[in-house]
Image (cartoon, grey):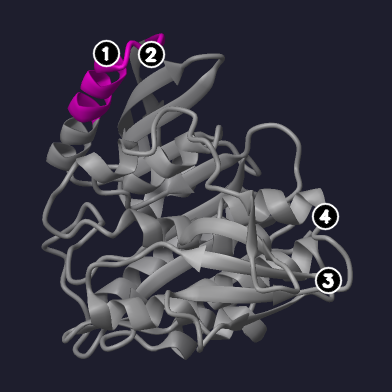
Amino acid sequence: MNYTLLLWPHANARYQQETRRLALAELRLMLDRTAPGAEASIDEAAPMPCLDIACDAPLPERALYAIRTHSLLYGLFERRADGSLLSVEGRADALLGDDLPAILKYKGKTNELFLQLLINVALYSGDFWDAEGPLEFMDPMCGRATAPFIALNRGWNAVGADVDRADLKEAERFFKRYLEYHRFKHRLTREARTLEKGKSAPVTRFEVGEGVTLRLMELDAARSGEALPRNSLHLIACDLPYGVRHDAQPGQSLPKGANWLETLLARALPGWHRLLKPGGSVALSFNAQTTRRDRLRALLADAGFDIRAEGPCDQLEHWVEQAITRDVVVGVKKG
């Protein structure tokens, strides 16, 4: 059978060309897990941006479910012999609202569609892509919680951590107003997590609907491993900062020539590894103009992760703007 996946349009024409490659890599990662043998390609002749899927039999339900969560899905169609298209799937329903991760705008925000891709890369690289029940997700440098909002919309429990108190407060205020405006039943509580050496991390906890939770933590990224139980997360995904510090020691001096982000990750990754369940995965996006892919993969390996370095995971580098060429590294905790 043949299918056409129509892609979500992007306002930036140059980035639109990049999205086809990204969407193809994401789709291939999904199909490798859910429909082995299915082949995906870019439809160069189509008047609109779309991908082709060819397979010997109808796509199984698990593949259709995965495609519904594809970051750039506009619609999935069966392509018939006469050239007509039959609608098969649209985007997956959001638990709270499709607009939740998109409304809040701020300087340095990562595009919510790219974050959806990053989360999918983590999910379909690890062992929990077909797990039953809600997953446990964390973004350890979450800004104003765009990625945790995406995870919530998928029915998962989410943790967003950051050292910027103002960003976390804005995320809290926005989410509370959003829930109240849409009349979602919820409960807000405050607590603190005890860290080593007598430190603590303030936590704002939202419980929404039937027990789905969002926790916002004021926390140094390198101390995440102290704030949550060992083996408690299925997924970690994070768009690493471009020049913004995410540790609690902004005045700390570094050796000459040292890369601040690599220094932080060398401290943080062992803790993130501790938090993941065996088979859990981490996906990190970064600016390839300032940080090398092989260096980040080496740091992941040093922390105990298996590196996903072939196939779709090697096809995610893309242009964002003049000073940013974004790429992704992926690691999985050994089962």
Asked if marks 2 and 3 touch (Cβ < 8 Å), the reply is no
- Upstream in sequence: badge 4 or badge 2: 4
Find the magenta span and give its range.
Answer: 172-186
Q: What amino acid type is highlighted by mark number 1?
A: Glu
Where in the figure is residue 46, as x and y percent of width and height?
Answer: 49, 81
Q: Check disc 4 and give the amino acid type.
A: Pro
Q: Residues within 10 Å of mark 3 (few under 14, many from 20)?
A: few
User: Dot 4: within a 10 Å radius of its alpha carbon, few (fewer than 14), some, or many (20 or more) residues?
Assistant: few
SS of the residue under disc 3: loop
Q: Nearer the viewer, residue 311 or 217?
A: 311
Q: CA distance from mark 2 to mark 3?
A: 40 Å
Q: Given contact means CB atoms under 8 Å apart, are the residues at marks 1 and 4 in contact?
A: no
Crowd band around label 2 with a 10 angstrom C-alpha radius: few (<14), some (14–19), many (20+): few
Q: Is residue 95 left or right of residue 87?
A: left
Between the residue at mark 2 and the residue at mark 1, the CA separation in whole angstroms equals 6 Å
**Quick one: label 2 or label 3, which is nearer the N terminus?**
3
